[in-house]
Image: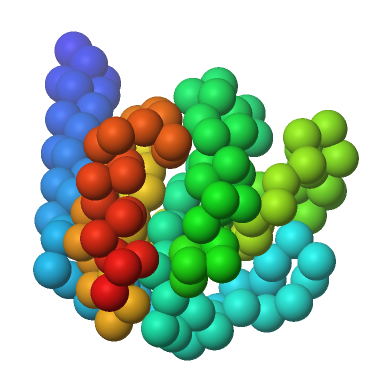
């Protein structure tokens, strides 16, 4: 009887701690109007990148994973958006927490022209408050977050165009 009570108590304590951690992470999630946190991570070629590298550009930071079907579904339209708008000052950074080998395998099968960043330590994921994939942050040329997209997007669609087009015109 005593061990059953102890097990219940341990489970309740563990559940409480999990919920507290999740609520703290959700509270740290970035919102529209926040300044985008800086980062220092390697791209898929092994070159260190920081937010300062993209100063003065409209930036979309997309958090994704190669094993995530919705993430894979949106990549073609995202890559097309980048190809169409890169000369107007758009930069798209696709951030994954996966290891180099997984990223290389994915890019060999599904080549992308946009920049892929490897956040293997999860520092960007934590600083941006990412809890699920795909999740994307759109920043203006001053580095302020102007839109957060949750879930799969048609990156060539109207909802994205209404956000991106005015930013590129500035």
Q: Position of residue 166 (x, y in %)?
A: 25, 60
Q: Position of residue 165 (x, y in %)?
A: 31, 55
Q: Tell which of 90 and 152 is nearer to you.
A: 90
Q: Residue furthest top?
A: 1
Q: Residue furthest front?
A: 169
Left or right of 121: which side holds 165?
left
- In the image, what residue occupies the spot 29% across and 34% down? 158
- In the image, what residue occupies the spot 37% across and 43% down? 135
Relative to 130, is 92 above or below?
below
- Total tally of numbered discs in the picture: 0
Q: Tell which of 81 and 10 is nearer to you.
A: 81
Q: Position of residue 112 (x, y in %)?
A: 71, 46
Q: Tell which of 38 and 89 is nearer to you.
A: 89
Q: Position of residue 155 (x, y in %)?
A: 43, 38
Quadrant that contains the N terminus:
top left
Instruction: Examine the image and state in which quarter residue 27 appears.
Output: bottom left
- In the image, what residue occupies the spot 22% across and 16% down? 4
Instruction: Examine the image and state in which quarter residue 87 appears.
Output: bottom right
Left or right of 30: which side holds 164?
right
Left or right of 27: which side holds 137?
right
Whether residue 123 is visible here, answered yes or no, is no
- In the image, what residue occupies the spot 66% across and 48% down? 98
Relative to 101, is 116 above or below?
below
């Amino acid at each position: 009887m005593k061990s059953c009570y102890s097990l219940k108590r341990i489970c309740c304590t563990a559940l409480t701690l999990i919920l507290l951690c999740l609520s703290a992470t959700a509270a740290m999630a970035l919102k529209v109007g926040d300044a985008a946190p800086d980062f220092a991570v390697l791209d898929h070629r092994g070159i260190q990148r920081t937010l300062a590298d993209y100063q003065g550009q409209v930036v979309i930071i997309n958090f994704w994973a190669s094993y995530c079907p919705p993430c894979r579904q949106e990549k073609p339209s995202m890559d097309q958006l980048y190809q169409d708008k890169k000369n107007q000052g758009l930069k798209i950074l696709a951030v994954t927490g996966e290891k180099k080998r997984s990223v290389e395998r994915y890019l060999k099968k599904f080549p992308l022209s946009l920049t892929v960043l490897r956040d293997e330590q999860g520092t960007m994921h934590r600083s941006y408050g990412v809890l699920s994939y795909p999740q994307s942050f759109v920043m203006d040329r001053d580095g302020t977050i102007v839109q957060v997209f949750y879930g799969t997007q048609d990156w060539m669609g109207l909802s994205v165009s209404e956000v991106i087009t005015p930013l590129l015109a500035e």
